[in-house]
């Protein structure tokens, strides 16, 4: 399993995990919040609101806390 730090989820640093079959999970370092999970087919399985303040000032709306 590969892991890489990315900063593309708003202003929040996040860890992107990629499994050998291509499935991916993305976890923010702000509260260890799971914000994305894509199966090997690439389809997103979690919802995160576009209204979330992604700067660490408030809780993330959606995903799995």
Image: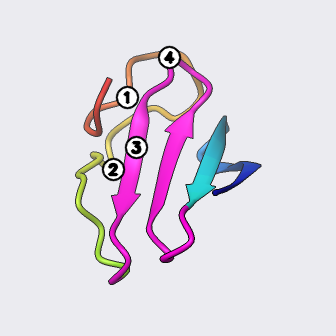
Q: Nearer the viewer, mark 2 or mark 1?
A: 1
Q: CA distance from mark 2 to mark 4?
A: 18 Å
Q: Is 1 placed above or below 28 here?
A: below
Q: Which element type, helix, strand or loop, lies under badge 3?
A: strand
How busy is the neighbourhood of tag 4: few (under 14 within 10 Å), some, or many (20 plus)? few
* Residue 31 marker: 4
Q: In the rendered structure, does residue 29 fall within the stretch colored magenta?
A: yes
Residue to which mark 2 is pinned: 50
Q: Nearer the viewer, mark 1 or mark 4?
A: 4
Mark 3–mark 4 CB contact (< 8 Å): no
Measured Cα–Cα span from mark 1 to mark 4 = 9 Å
Q: Which residue is mark 3?
A: 35
C-alpha span from label 3 to label 4: 11 Å
Circle 1/circle 3 CB separation < 8 Å: yes
Going by the image, does 50 lie left or right of 17? left
Q: Which residues are magenta?
A: 19-41
The CA distance from mark 2 to mark 1 is 10 Å
* Residue 50 x, y percent position in the rendering: 33, 50
Q: Is residue 54 left or right of residue 43?
A: right
Residue 7 vs residue 41, the one in the foreground: 41
The structure residue drawn at horizontal position 50% and vertical position 16%, both measured from the top left corner, is 31
Q: Are marks 1 and 4 in contact (CB under 8 Å)?
A: yes
Q: Earlier in the sequence, mark 1 or mark 4?
A: 4
Provide the residue designation for mark 1: 60
């Amino acid at each position: 399993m590969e892991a890489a730090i990315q900063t593309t989820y708003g202003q929040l640093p996040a860890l992107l995990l990629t499994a050998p079959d291509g499935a991916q999970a993305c976890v923010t370092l702000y509260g260890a919040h799971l914000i994305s999970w894509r199966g090997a087919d690439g389809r997103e399985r979690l919802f995160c609101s576009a209204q979330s303040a992604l700067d660490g000032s408030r809780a993330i709306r959606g995903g799995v806390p």
